[in-house]
């Protein structure tokens, strides 16, 4: 199974300019022991949000 994952190749991330494996095999034991799953977002996700130029500034919270 790990050999097939390596054969799937790598993905060239446009923003970070790094190559990451397309498939990554993680065991249940690794997940339960707290191993982080590295997930990088595609450029389209970063660009999907529009900025709001007509936002009202947040007022202060009086304590």
Image (cartoon, rainbow, N blue to C red):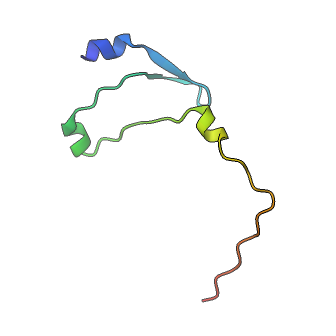
Q: Residue furthest left?
A: 29
Q: Is residue 56 left or right of residue 2?
A: right
Q: Residue furthest bottom?
A: 63
Q: How many numbered callouts?
A: 0
Q: Quadrant of residue 60?
A: bottom right
Rendered view: 15 above or below 7: below
Quadrant assignment for the C terminus: bottom right
26 left or right of 10 in image:
left
- Residue shown at 54%/24% (left/top)? 18
Residue at the image point whose x is 64% and y is 82% from the top: 61
Asked if residue 20 is positioned above or below residue 38 in the image, the reply reads: above
- Quadrant that contains the N terminus: top left
| Residue 44 drawn at (x, y percent) | 62, 34
Residue placed furthest toward the right: 54
Q: Is residue 21 above or below residue 49?
A: above
The location of residue 6, given as percent across then percent down, is 35, 14
Q: Quadrant of residue 31?
A: top left
Counting from the top left corner in percent of width and height, residue 58 is at 70, 72
Q: Is residue 29 left or right of residue 41?
A: left
Residue in the image at 62% along x and 40% along y: 46
Q: What residue appears at the point 75 percent right and 56 percent down from the top-left corner?
A: 52
């Amino acid at each position: 199974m790990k050999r097939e994952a390596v054969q799937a190749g790598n993905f060239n991330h446009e923003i970070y300019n790094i190559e990451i494996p397309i498939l990554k095999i993680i065991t249940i034991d690794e997940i339960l022991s707290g191993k982080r799953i590295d997930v990088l977002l595609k450029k389209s996700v970063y660009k999907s949000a529009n900025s709001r130029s007509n936002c009202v500034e947040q007022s202060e919270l009086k304590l």
